Image: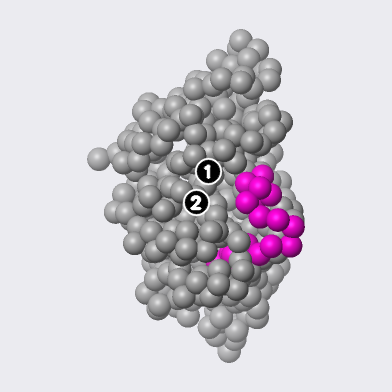
Amino acid sequence: MSTPVRALALEQLRERTSEKWREYPADVLPLFVAETDFPLAPAITRALERAVRTGDTGYVASRTPLAAAYAEFAERRFGWAPDPARMRSTADVSMGIVEILRRVTSPGERVIVMPPVYPPFYELVEEAGAVVERVPLCDTGTAWEIDLDGIRSALEDGARAILLCSPHNPTGTVHSAASLAALAELATAHDAAVVSDEIHAPLAQPDAGFTPFLAVSDAAREIGYAVVSASKAFNLAGLKCALMATASDGPTRVVKSLPIEVEWRTGQFGMLAAVAAFSEESDEWLDGLLATLDENRRLVADLLAEHLPDARYRMPDAGYLAWIDLTGLGWGANPSKRILREAKVALHFGPAFGAEGAGHVRLNFGTSPEIIAEAIARIGALQAREPHDA
């Protein structure tokens, strides 16, 4: 059994200068942006220390071990063996999405997104010159599922691409291999591309059954692109490194046709850190992190039941983000505003994820149990002071 990875103490975290710890005053507990509060995996620390010691801070090389490192990681963790020759790196997942969408759509064409979804998706589609086509996920009452009928209708009406979030942010859903295969068949039938953001894939819980999109079927390989990164699992977002992966000749040609500047935007430190993260040496740390996040997702459920019994929360299958429905409390479409103002807890605004996020908040539980407990107790105290609002 892996040893859980424990978060740093609050006083250490407040020494950080990243967005999470500088956006709000010190009396606010920041559980909004997707950064985690854990120490780096030891292999990453060693790789970065070595680079600083030797002054290895120049341009990223035209040949690096990154793609091979990811291919080996994917085979160990997901049972998928992608071809390193069919990958290219760039600065981050968002940049990879935009560059691919620019080449698989024409200006004004529609790209399907599945809200509630990571807010930048809407902006990335527009940055690529396309138009957002919303096909919300279906809430079955026990799970979130891809609306395949809605996807079919949008494709029949002319949508040209699908932007998939897998695992899904903010719900933490791991889409089934069967639903992904059906999505690929629909895309193939309508000559549409699927761009799969798999940044949260390393954080899928062991029993969740995560399958990379490019591994689900021949159809997926023919029309699919995956954009992957170590940044969410290993807290490396500021170092700027992601990979665009393909699995057949057509998509590979598209990615290979991107200007060299797209690849040169990869951060040197990001590449070095990602290679260390994807190495077998970091597997034990990642297993420990998953054990910690499993404890924390269950803790959130227990604390909500105690302090906010009218809240609705479904434990995520992947990641460290809790999607919480607070509509039963009567705190309006954007309850995070009141929570920030009165409870001094910063959560991500539900409406930013789409109209389906009204009355919701997203809480980052990639931190210590103590911080999670304090945050939810503070929020619960608002309801306790005004029980008539519940």
Residue at the outermost bottom position = 388
Quadrant of the rendered structure where residue 296 is? bottom left
Look at label 1 and name its amino acid.
Gly
Q: Position of residue 173 (x, y in %)?
A: 43, 61
Relative to 186, does residue 105 appear above or below in the rendering? above
What residue is shown at x 46% (from left), y 41% (from top)? 248
Give the residues in magenta: 99-115
Q: Secondary structure at mark 1?
A: helix
Relative to 63, does residue 350 appear above or below in the rendering? below
Camera-side residue of 77 and 385: 77
What residue is shown at x 55% (from left), y 72% (from top)? 156
Q: Is residue 254 left or right of residue 185?
A: right
Relative to 355, does residue 76 appear above or below in the rendering? above
Q: Is residue 360 left or right of residue 27?
A: left
Residues under numbered marks 2 and 1 in contact, where contact means CB atoms less than 8 Å apart? yes
Q: Which residue is mark 1?
A: 250
Q: Secondary structure at mark 2?
A: helix
Q: Is residue 276 visible?
A: yes
Few, some or many residues within 10 Å of mark 1 (<14, 14–19, 20+): few
Residue at the outermost top position = 54
Q: Position of residue 315 (x, y in %)?
A: 40, 64
What residue is shown at x 44% (from left), y 28% (from top)? 69
Q: Position of residue 138 (x, y in %)?
A: 46, 75
What residue is shown at x 39% (from left), y 71% (from top)? 143
Quadrant of the rendered structure where residue 256 is? top right
Q: Which residue is mark 2?
A: 223
Question: In 3D space, how far apart are the residues under numbered discs 2 and 1 (Cα atoms)?
Answer: 8 Å
